[in-house]
Image (cartoon, rainbow, N blue to C red):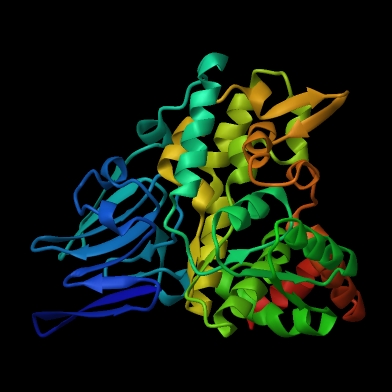
Amino acid sequence: MLYACLQTKEGVSRILTNAQFPCKQHKNVLYDASEESELKICEDMPLRVKGFYSVVAFKAKHILLSRDVIGGMPLYYSTTEFSSFRSLVDSANPVNPGEVVKISYDGEISIRKFSFDDVFKPSVSESDSVEEFMEVIEKKLSNYKHGDCVAFSGGVDSSLLASMYDVPLVSVTASEKEEEHIRWAAKEIGRDVYIFRFNEKVVKEVLPEVVKAIEESNPFHVSIGVPVYLALKKAKELGFKSMMFGQGADELFGGYKKYENYAGKDELFWILKRDVEMLGVNNLERDTKLAYKNGIKLMTPYLQWEIIKVAMKIPGNYKLRKVNGEIVRKYILRKIAEKYLPRELAYKQKKAVQYSTKTVKLLKRIAKTENMSIEELLSLYKQA
């Protein structure tokens, strides 16, 4: 978590700062960055930094704030306060993805905006380039400087990571059926796994923490946030400082069932592009805030800049392909996974985390007990 405050008293200004792990401070710069070696503080940062970042830099004549074009790490500001959490800043404005915000010490604000297209230049390539793209993806994943553990669900995304990196696997679920699947998947790749089974009582206990952390009461975000929070919390309890998730694989390679409606159509490219552009708003801001609250680093191997670049050039029929009369989602990723996983595991379809873990079901049950809708229940936690 980042926090900084500019205080002026009797014409004298001072800067108060706080950078809690995994965020860091180096002299007058506070930051979080997925690739620290790439961090270059300048006025066109989104073009120069390859990776997710948020930064607050106190310079001689102004304060510079910026985020990457996807928006992997949240950042809010006023003319005197800056933080990873909206609630810590009075009259907060978000630093939007791809923005470079300059604030003079007199309070004057100027904003420069860079787009997803400026950085990734998406366009569909010819199909004869696909083998080369697959090699890039596999190489970038296998050479990734991995974290301490993998958030393991038994799906192809986390199973591929688990097979590539010799680190512990951590799972959370409220479903007996999913636990059986997780144990089977771990056994298939010859790995042990820590499994934490949660229940209605646990969900009720952590709901206030989750809603406060993600700073919203949207049922969609909370239902995903609960298992993510519990996984991060369990990893922290086990002594890990970082945790790898499979975020981004569905958007990059066509994993969601909704994409089947666009299989074989030109619209698929634009639907996937939009969802990759919105990864920060739809997923990463929420999950990063949950990681900050647990004091652990969130890592996303699939969202390396070079993987995103090549994924945005892969033809749609390599992302969703009809095989034996059925559409196979994430086809190209499953082809890569065949080298590392048993075929049954590489091609097994899996429900979204909020359903596979039974989190949505438990939220409905809790709300019903309180004679409320889920929306009403969660709004109470937000107001508390």
Q: Position of residue 76 (x, y in %)?
A: 39, 64
Q: 183 or 240, which is in the foreground? A: 183
Q: Is residue 73 left or right of residue 271?
A: left
**Labels in figure, total:** 0
What x and y, as percent, mark residue 102?
A: 22, 54
Answer above or below: position of 54 versus 46.
below
Q: Residue at x 90, y 77 (%)?
A: 371
Residue 10, image quadrant:
bottom left
- Which x, y percent locates residue 13? 13, 79
Q: Find residue 210 and report its horizontal and vertical position in percent.
A: 63, 75
Note whether residue 324 is visible: yes
For this view, does 11 lie left or right of residue 291? Answer: left
Q: Residue at x 79, y 65 (%)?
A: 183
Residue placed farthest to the front in the image? 190
Q: Is residue 357 visible in this depiction of the protein?
A: no
Q: Quadrant of the C terminus?
A: bottom right
Frontmost residue, 175 versus 55: 175
Residue at horizontal 37%, vertical 78%?
20
Q: In front here: 217 or 341? A: 341
- The quarter of the rendered structure image containing the N terminus is bottom left
Question: Closest to the observer: 279 or 324?
Answer: 324
The answer to which quarter of the image holds residue 221 is bottom right
